[in-house]
């Protein structure tokens, strides 16, 4: 078994530097690498390009990095519900590349799986496809989209083991699996880190080969963005 | 009388057939789930990674790790599954989802849709909408017929940046049900008490009116 | 919940006809749809094109269809250990297209996921790439390979539920997940079929949306091809 | 004395470094697992869908659902995982596997490899070999230096259909360890008691001999 466990979030983020490209898992505030984000704030690295489906809210998730102007560019599919983001974007301080959500997932997966590019129908005929190569297959048009290149991927899983194996919970899975192994170094944080052999090999969502470093996060706030409930009748 | 959002959702719910997997967009489409006939079997997919969505959780039972694409806390029904974003869009791109219902800011008479950006003003992003409209074989748009300023949202050409090209099949608004045909918007049904004239006046794109236009049954 | 359960293997294979293209899961004899294969023999459909990593052995798996000359063409990555196969291939009775194993998996996945084609480095510079489009990305050469088109996919899973959700066991997983939803109709057979709600939604390998029909196989021989053991010391 | 298959496997085992994920082909490569140093941590991947392979099972404990790519019954070690063929080749194509060891029928001096087909005679297929050699950054070939007829398997140009082009980095045979360089096969080590002359005679491709060639340490 190849040991992936590191002692702390500080050890896990060694090598992160200004002007790097980072991938961050999560959908909205669900399944985001809270501890890695907190440490990025602490480290105060700047000029970051962040590949993440969303940009957090004003005071949580990637919003914390936006507040401190650590992010130079966001590559996302949806960035609503964040006033500071909107301000920085409209003022031109922040560079924003909006791409379709499925394209985002698949450009991560391409990087993970060694594919240089993919053909997707998403965005054909829209400004997302401007300047991009397009091609017809069986009468339908597709856009050529390239694999991402990133320095670090920050992943949040539910459980993990020393070997780097990961299990996700519910919809906190989202982009996390596709980003594992899609960057030079993949850092996973988990709510519960267990010894190798504890997890059922049949039920592992991401094998440890895609993970370079793993640690147990100190705390998780797991903030809910839209608390919707019904009443017991 | 023009429909309210609930009315639009109720009318769209009648388009949902037994055995359909359905993706519901944020806003009016989300309401559709509440009005689907109870004697048919349908599963709702949310592109953030869940199939078999159920109602909102009871108070105190919310789970931050179980949400829909609108970031709302949800529950799941027996037979549900969770999956990652890549597999989720495999379902969508691979046309395994039979019906997509989403909102729009504009639709054009050739089926183009715009719903993700107002240049210089509002840029929330397309989320999964571009993947959905580029792949789905059956797309219904749920929206108000006109914007707050009273201008038509059913246009000859969209003025806003497009989300997808020639993809919308059907539109349900507060005033009417319309089908997108090679010749323009064909009026299928009127909202209760709404006249053809009212719909005509609220539609900028080419409106096709063939024979008597019945009122919607809700 | 959308019901996918059918009463029998006969119901599950309704619509299978001569000259169709079939996908069949399995690696060697591990994780093959034994009951579907037995029924294909029974139905005596002929002129089949079979997409399957291997072609079985002389008296088991796809070898049973080969014996009865039901297969016109095999698309596989490895076809050793089958004398009748070799005889039919060398004599020209059987058309054989050999393709790299990763390409086979990914052409299935492309069909499942709505991708028209993929670029893979596998086979570049070899006869596998002859007549195919090639392209350079970042100084490396890739071959354009197209998504498969198939009429039926026959899948073997360990457990499944009425909603068509599947869980695989061990290395019997192999090509089965990639083939789900990659054909017009996907037929899954399982060792144990349970009511919806029994399986943990977090641990489902393939959601039921990719499966049109599911049934519990009557028996499974699960033959071992190479029984290798060590002695207790 | 020329090495036997076990000797070749032992020599190759020394190329396996701490922290490596390794894919072993069928035949001699499979034996390598038995000789890897016990003080280093290595995980074996098999392309049919398992990472963290252990030894063969004890008699009576074989599981038909747990095999390696050679279709042999195996066990798994703590930290193992099972996955599908697509994810398995993501590991390979995505260069997450650090070392690939496989057999060959022929290798050419520019690193081409042929190991899947003898036209008109033997066509077993390439299995995962073409994916492995096209993607792996570190490929070691394990083979006999000559074929049964005594002809060299280290050639100027392969005569058999290729598996991959310019991909082999190192070759360990029963006679020698060789590195593939832009100028040809560079002889690195001799098998115990085998002379440079013997290796020369058994090598059809261009052989580079620089300085003293040490004997292998096993």
Image: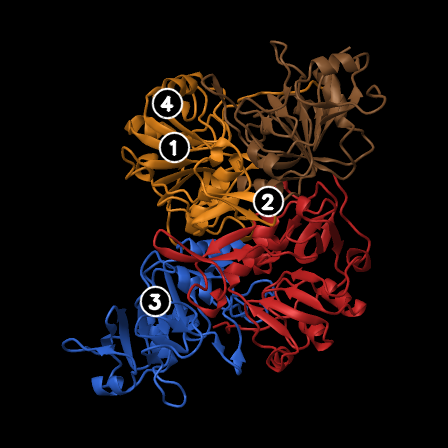
Chain colours: A red, B blue, C orange, D brown
Q: Where is residue D29 in the image (x, y as percent from the top left)?
A: 67, 25
Q: Position of residue D49 (x, y in %)?
A: 58, 37
Residue indicated by mark 3: B166
Check the image and report above or below for C140 versus D180. Answer: below
Say if labels 1 and 3 share a chain: no
Label 4 resides on the chain identified as C
Distance from Cα at disc 1 to Cα at disc 2: 32 Å
Residue indicated by mark 1: C50
Q: Where is residue A228 in the image (x, y as percent from the top left)?
A: 53, 73
Mark 1 or mark 3, whichever is nearer to me: 3
In the rendering, which numbered label is found on residue C117? none
Distance from Cα at disc 3 to Cα at disc 4: 47 Å
Mark 4 or mark 2: whose residue is earlier in sequence: 4
Side of C68 relative to A119 (left or right): left
Residue indicated by mark 2: C140
Quarter of the figure that contains the N terminus of chain A: top right
């Amino acid at each position: 078994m190849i040991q992936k466990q590191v002692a702390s979030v500080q050890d896990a983020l060694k090598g992160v530097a200004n002007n790097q490209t980072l991938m961050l898992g999560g959908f909205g505030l669900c399944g985001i690498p809270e501890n890695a984000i907190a440490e990025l704030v602490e480290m105060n690295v700047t000029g970051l390009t962040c590949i993440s489906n969303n940009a957090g809210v004003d005071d949580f998730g990637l919003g914390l990095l936006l507040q401190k102007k650590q992010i130079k560019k966001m590559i996302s599919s949806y960035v609503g519900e964040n006033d500071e983001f909107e301000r920085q974007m409209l003022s031109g301080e922040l560079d924003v590349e909006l791409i379709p959500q499925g394209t985002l997932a698949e450009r991560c997966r391409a990087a993970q799986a060694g594919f240089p590019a993919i053909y997707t129908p998403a965005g054909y005929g829209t400004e997302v496809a401007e300047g991009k190569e397009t091609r017809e297959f069986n009468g339908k048009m597709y856009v050529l989209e390239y694999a991402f290149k990133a320095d670090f991927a920050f992943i949040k899983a539910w459980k993990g083991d020393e070997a780097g194996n990961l299990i996700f919970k519910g919809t906190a899975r989202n982009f996390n699996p596709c980003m594992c192994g899609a960057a030079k170094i993949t850092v996973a944080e988990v709510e519960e880190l267990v010894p190798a052999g504890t997890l059922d090999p049949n039920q592992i969502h991401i094998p440890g080969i895609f993970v370079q470093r793993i640690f147990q996060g100190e705390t998780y706030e797991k903030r809910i963005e839209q608390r919707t409930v019904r009443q017991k009748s | 009388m023009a429909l309210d959002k609930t009315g639009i959702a109720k009318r769209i719910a009648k388009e949902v057939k037994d055995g359909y997997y359905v993706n519901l967009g944020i806003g009016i489409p989300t309401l559709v789930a509440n009005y689907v006939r109870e004697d048919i079997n349908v599963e709702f997919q949310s592109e953030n990674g869940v199939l078999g969505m159920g109602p909102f959780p009871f108070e105190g039972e919310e789970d931050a790790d179980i949400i829909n694409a609108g970031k709302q806390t949800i529950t799941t029904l027996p037979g549900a599954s969770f999956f990652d974003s890549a597999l989720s869009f495999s379902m969508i791109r691979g046309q395994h989802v039979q019906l997509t219902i989403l909102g729009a800011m504009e639709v054009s008479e050739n089926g183009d849709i715009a719903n993700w950006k107002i240049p210089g003003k509002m840029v929330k992003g397309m989320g999964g909408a571009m993947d959905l409209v580029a792949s789905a074989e059956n797309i219904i748009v749920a929206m108000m017929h006109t914007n707050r300023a009273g201008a038509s949202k059913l246009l000859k050409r969209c003025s806003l940046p497009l989300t997808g090209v020639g993809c919308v099949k059907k539109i349900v608004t507060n005033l009417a049900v319309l089908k997108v045909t090679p010749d323009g918007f064909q009026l299928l049904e009127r909202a209760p008490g709404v006249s053809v004239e009212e719909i005509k006046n609220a539609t900028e794109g080419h409106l096709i009116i063939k024979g008597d236009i019945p009122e919607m049954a809700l």
